[in-house]
Amino acid sequence: MIESAPVVLVIDDEVQIRRFLRAGLELDGFVVQDAETGSDALKWVTLKQPDLIILDLGLPDMDGADVLERLRAWSSVPLIVLSVRSNEAEKVRLLESGADDYVVKPFGMAELLARAHAAMRRQVRAAAGEPVVRAGPLAIDLAARVVMLNGSRVVLTPKEYKLLQILAQHAGNVVTHQYLLKEVWGSPHVHDTHYLRIFVRKLRQKIEQDPTQPRILLTELGIGYRLAIPEPGTAGSVQ
Amino acid sequence: MASERKLRLWFDAVRRDLRGIVIALLMVAATTTIAYALVAYLDIRRGSVIYLIPVLLAGWHLGLVPALVAAAAGVLWSGYLFYSPYYAYFIARPFEILNLSLFMIVAVVTSHLANSMKKQTELARKREIEMSDLYAFSRKLGVVSTAADIYRAIEEHLAKLVQRKVVVFGPGSANDQRLEDNTVPDKVRAAIADVQCGSTVATTAADEVGTTWLVRRVSERTPDFGVIAIDLGNVRGSDVEDIRHRVDGVLSDATATLEQLDVARAINDAKMRSETEQLREALIGSVSHELRTPLSSILGAATVLTQSPAIAKDERLTSLAGVVRDEAERLNNDIQNLLDATRISREQVKPRPECIEPLDIVNSALERRRRRLAGHNDAVDMDTNLPFIYVDPVLVEQAFTQVIDNAAKYSPSGSTIKVAARRNGHDLILSVNDTGAGLTDAEKTRIGERFFRGPRHAVTTSGSGLGFWIAKAFVVANGGKIEAVSSGADRGTTISIHLPLAPDAPQLEVGSDD
């Protein structure tokens, strides 16, 4: 893990939102840096590399999507977007252009922290070459390409495995339909959502205790899927 | 070219008449058979008037030329049968020639009368249809509330009259929207813009695939009535003129009517009405938006409080922080309802349907209302093998959440709320059943109305009367329907949402896994 306290950059023009974010993030052990505008944020990021960025899309000086795009041109720092409801298309666009995840305003601190930790863990995992991703009773060994459920091996078809593998690589964070379709079936099939529905149903039958009430492979309506991971060390009961 | 067309028209007319002439002659032949029988068996000698029957029939149904032919043939045959010497076309007595000539004159006049009467009847019928169309049109104008609706009515009316695809572009705000209508090609749009600026009254434009469009102002006198574009199809230059004349005729009638109906004022009124409505909606929209920002801070802060060690130690404080959080959430839902209602009345609900697992919608809604349902027993009955549905998942989930909200709100805590998903023919039914307040017959008929609240609960249970209305609008927008069944007051309610199934997926392709 990161030795010193992780630094988070909060980009939001609403002072009250910054205040509670600061309180919540500091309680969780982050060092918090604020930025009110997109240009301030971009300036600050070039000077110091934060461990996490929380970006509100409604900024006074520039479009949040532009901030994201300019950041992603040179930095892969974990980034969570604060979005408003009922604009799924925009959320998908932001995820496609490099946001790691989003929360919808108004949101609870626990939800934001869960997304943030998942995004940060992915980077650590990638850097350290950690091969095993755990999601409840499920363990996915990305190196050995083996999936275990409660200690016994789950037999998956190659496409089912590929699907689970991508979700595991992003464990805790949402993965869009388009991304999954492109990675598993190839670019010509990015709109064939029914492929995904069929395979997710099959996968759930193999990995979920009750496939009608999935706890591991979760759906984000209109966006994509999320592999749920337990939240170590945070107040998971608080929403 | 023109003379060639005239020749063709003449030839067509003759051919049409030829058919009439043949039929007229056949009728005369039939009459002759009857007349012959009268002469041979009953020895009737003054029966020439019988030949007026085919003349009248021909004049009524076949036109003037066949009627005249029938008259001539009738004269010939009466001469043969009824005038001496019988059974010869030769007539001996001079007064009989006079008699026959009189018959001829009567026949000609009769045929002419029959023909013109027929024409007038047809004209009257056509006028009647046009009038009833016009009445329907004016009735429609009487009840519409927006300028766009008026133009839609004009469009429908004119399309009916000219039997072509007609697009009307009204003045003011309505036309920007219509200009984006992608059934109208770019070149035609350019022509429309031209006419709108007032540089010409009428023009024609051909699009990429060779379809000709006639573009002209609805009224030649004023641009107030907007511009009309008519798809003439794939026609040649000479025919364009033809159709153009017809359209001119129709439009001059139409504009006269428009002026009589005071459409200009109606448009203005409608504009005012819709602007007022828009202002109201904008106000609701912006107020709701403004409320939401502080609400985000309140809700976020409350969750931080519940998390902080200092408060977590004290149970009373934790529960207080919980109250702040729950109430903020409730307020947020109310604001969301207002925003959704605004969206619905602005017709901004645009479903983005996709193939979706029905379980996901149910589970997502249940998860969203987990805390609210905590006081109830929820029994979920779903199959793992439900067919996929083709809907906008977000809208349907919101609709389903509203239904769950109502079930939780109007049934006692501790009671059971049953949630089920099942297939029914070409539909998938999501249903929520509670054992609560139920619906009286009177309530059942009004439950879909905006702001309707059952009088039995208006005082005791908070609510805006928007939930079911929103749910209904979202379900209908997705091609579904929503039904409320209840066996009466306090006997529980079952709400069923019917949703369209996704078309069968190409199973083979998916099945070939690598």
Image (tube, grey):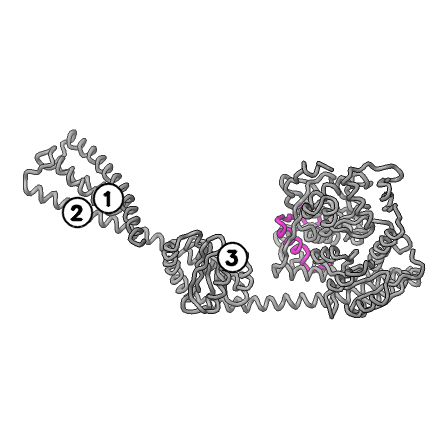
In the image, what residue type sits under mark 2? Answer: Val
* Residue located farthest toward the left when viewing the structure as drawn: B93
Q: Position of residue B34 (x, y in %)?
A: 21, 33
Compare marks 2 and 1 and give the one earlier in the sequence: 1
Give residue B41's quadrant in the image. top left
Magenta region:
B461-490
> What residue is at 35 percent from the left and 52 percent from the top?
B125
Horizontal relation, residue A130 to residue B19: left or right = right
Q: Position of residue A47 (x, y in %)?
A: 85, 67
Compare marks 3 and 2 and give the one earlier in the sequence: 2
Q: Secondary structure at mark 2?
A: helix
Give the chain letter at badge 1. Answer: B
Of badges 2 and 1, nearer the viewer stands 1
Q: Secondary structure at mark 3?
A: loop
Q: Which residue is mark 1?
A: B66
Question: Looking at this view, is A143 or A169 the one in front?
Answer: A143
Residue B300 higher or lower than B506, as above or below: below
Do marks 3 and 2 share a chain?
Answer: yes
Of badges 3 and 2, nearer the viewer stands 3
Binning the other alpha carbons within 10 Å of mark 3 as few (below 14), some (14 to 19) or many (20 upward) gives some
Binning the other alpha carbons within 10 Å of mark 2 as few (below 14), some (14 to 19) or many (20 upward) gives some
Of badges 3 and 1, nearer the viewer stands 3
Q: Secondary structure at mark 1?
A: helix
Q: Position of residue B184 (x, y in %)?
A: 51, 57
Residue B264 higher or lower than B347, as above or below: below
Q: Which residue is mark 3?
A: B184
Q: Position of residue B462 (x, y in %)?
A: 73, 60
